[in-house]
Image (cartoon, coloured by chain):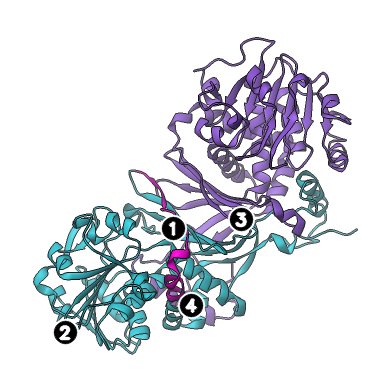
Chain colours: A cyan, B purple
């Protein structure tokens, strides 16, 4: 008796958290971020060709669940991501994420993956890309304000992509700084743990703020920021959550991902709705100026955008061409005769009744 | 050396197509549909408590990819579904689907599942529910017009839930009718293959149309439909795709799922935008009248709505409490310290270097 196994067409590559970690270790965190920068650069350069649907958010008292879809007409990607600040007290993650890439031509999924680790990589890659296009020449020193889950990725991305040699760490919680310093001890970076944001910023060419307080916080005050620096402000990423004093914004040339979203979620929610900003893709595509001169303060007000997830998903899909770090999931029904779904179920009984004839997925 | 395995919190139950088929075979198709009817009835009764986000569609020349989210404030569900009519000529499905259920309280996914088979069950369950509330008393005969992938499920659902004894089949393609008749041969239903839609409808108490032509088709003409019948028109489910002659609509009491969506996608796209319709939930909640009398024609203009998928996802989640038909997916990153994502990746190196110490997911 011939028993048909599940068709190849029904199989979608799935990257678990474990496999994602192993893939990143195979490639190296720094190299992975640098590779993703290449995908981001390519996609930012052709930004107008993307479908920029607003994220679809389901808000509740405790948090938010969002779907972030986008497409370039060839591939379609979306990320599921939640944000639940109260989760940490229950030993759960504030943010978890997974993502999917599909073929626009057939509608078939081609990749399902965890996206917590992948989002950390793409967020670091986005800051590195912004710094390369907007920051001062040959930056040597990064001030990393906020030493949580993103901090090491930011530092390593800027090391690999922009040549940063020293990272100066500050967090209101010294335990976070200790964790980050220990993790970066053998990275090749000179790591300096600082007692205050002011001390961390001293002599920094690039400042990245990635803090977690969900409030109108002022991580950086106006007098702390000197001329010529580049700031990646990536922790202010939802309404009511900002990091920089308004006066810093007023002194900066401001660059954003997607203006309508950043007006609501970014640090520029503190400014008038018509305050001039430049979209980063315009600089990358050669359609807008980068920093005016060596003394300008450039600010990348990063909130995260669906196209960045898309770039990261495409990087992962391509990386899997030469990596075994995935399994195949049987998530698409594929009857021999598309009109005979019922018959497909009935024929499954034959396989069920054959003890271990075919391994289960 | 202690090596921590992936945390339980990182594991999400996943139902593959194979496991879904086996679960349905364990329970029985008819019983599964009947159980889903119970979930649907409960959810339709509390319809106003659901967040009814419009579906998010990405259209292309070849088809559409949609995300259909909804939430009742406790659970959050969404379905990914594509529609690519040209797929069949390449041996692919026109429609594939998968779905997710998550906890609103934590944002954590609690179920990931194939939804091609599950959608077939919920679509049949929805017709059965509508027929029970709207149809004539003690219906005996179903005319099933369109004998594709949905046909057997529709017939078995109406048998189980409404007591249908005989099904009369018609399809423009006799091979589809033969397939359907063969599949239903041992179902306990009297099966009559008919040469025309007119013959199939003769003596029918309930008519279900589920045809696939993407055009303004007229599967039923006005003179074919007598008084007292109930029609489930479920194949007209997108703009430009209808099944019934306009005059039938004008003679019927029309019931829909969600009026704004059905005005665009359903058979009532042929009618004026203010033509009176009743939402099915209103009947189930006791807030609107069902059929006026035994001679009325009732029409359920079904297009499929996110809440129905939600009901089906909740049914599946509960069914898995007593079923082994799932595997656990490691899709959520769960570091011991939420702020130490980087350290989690580095510690994975220890596990990688231990040959087969811990089984891979």
The crowding category of the residue bearing disc 2, from other C-alpha atoms within 10 Å (few below 14, some 14 to 19, many at least 20), is some
Q: Tell us which disc is closer to us: 2 or 3.
A: 3
From the viewer's perspective, is residue A323 above or below residue B97? below
Q: Are marks 2 and 3 in contact (CB under 8 Å)?
A: no
Q: Chain of mark 1?
A: A
The crowding category of the residue bearing disc 1, from other C-alpha atoms within 10 Å (few below 14, some 14 to 19, many at least 20), is some
Left or right, residue A221 beside residue A78: left
Q: Position of residue A337 (x, y in %)?
A: 80, 51
> Label 2 belongs to which residue?
A203
Q: Chain of mark 2?
A: A
Q: Which residues are magenta?
A: A40-60
Q: Tell us which disc is closer to us: 1 or 3.
A: 3
Q: Tell us which disc is closer to us: 4 or 1.
A: 1
Residue at (35, 88) in percent of width and height: A186
Residue at (57, 43) in percent of width and height: B313
Q: Are marks 1 and 2 in contact (CB under 8 Å)?
A: no
Question: Looking at the image, is mark 4 or mark 2 earlier in the sequence?
Answer: 4
Distance of label 3 from label 4 (alpha carbons): 36 Å
Distance of label 1 from label 2 (alpha carbons): 39 Å
Q: SS of the residue at dot 4?
A: helix
Q: Position of residue B115 (x, y in %)?
A: 63, 48
Mark drawn on residue A24? 4
> Label 1 belongs to which residue?
A52
């Amino acid at each position: 008796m011939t028993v048909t196994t599940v068709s190849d067409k029904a199989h979608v590559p799935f990257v678990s958290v474990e496999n994602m970690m192993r893939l990143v270790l195979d490639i190296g965190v720094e190299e992975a971020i640098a590779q993703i920068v290449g995908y981001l650069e390519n996609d930012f350069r052709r930004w107008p060709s993307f479908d920029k649907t607003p994220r679809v958010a389901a808000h509740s008292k405790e948090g938010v669940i969002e779907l972030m879809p986008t497409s370039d007409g060839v591939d379609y990607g979306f990320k599921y991501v939640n944000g639940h600040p109260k989760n940490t007290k229950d030993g759960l993650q504030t943010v978890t994420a997974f993502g999917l890439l599909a073929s626009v031509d057939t509608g078939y999924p081609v990749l399902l993956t965890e996206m917590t680790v992948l989002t950390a990589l793409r967020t670091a890659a986005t800051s590195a890309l912004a710094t390369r296009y907007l920051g001062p020449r040959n930056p040597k020193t990064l001030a990393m304000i906020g030493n949580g889950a993103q901090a090491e990725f930011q530092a390593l991305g800027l090391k690999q992509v922009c040549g940063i040699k020293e990272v100066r760490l500050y967090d209101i919680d010294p335990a976070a700084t200790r964790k980050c310093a220990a993790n970066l001890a053998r990275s090749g970076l000179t790591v300096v743990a600082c007692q205050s944001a002011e001390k961390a910023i001293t002599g920094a060419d690039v400042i990245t703020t990635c803090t977690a307080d969900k409030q109108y916080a002022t991580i950086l005050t106006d007098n702390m920021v000197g001329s010529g620096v580049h700031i990646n402000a990536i922790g202010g990423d939802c309404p009511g959550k900002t990091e920089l004093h308004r006066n810093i914004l007023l002194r900066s040339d401001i660059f954003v991902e997607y203006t309508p979203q950043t007006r609501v979620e970014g640090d520029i929610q503190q400014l008038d709705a018509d305050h001039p900003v430049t979209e980063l893709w315009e600089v990358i595509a050669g359609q807008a100026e980068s920093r005016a001169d060596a003394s300008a303060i450039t600010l990348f007000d990063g909130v995260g955008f669906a196209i960045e997830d898309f770039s990261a998903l495409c990087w992962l899909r391509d990386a899997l061409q030469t990596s075994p770090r995935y399994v195949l999931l049987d998530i698409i029904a594929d009857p021999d005769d598309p009109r005979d779904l019922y018959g497909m179920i009935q024929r499954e009984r034959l396989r069920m009744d054959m003890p271990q004839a075919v391994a289960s997925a």
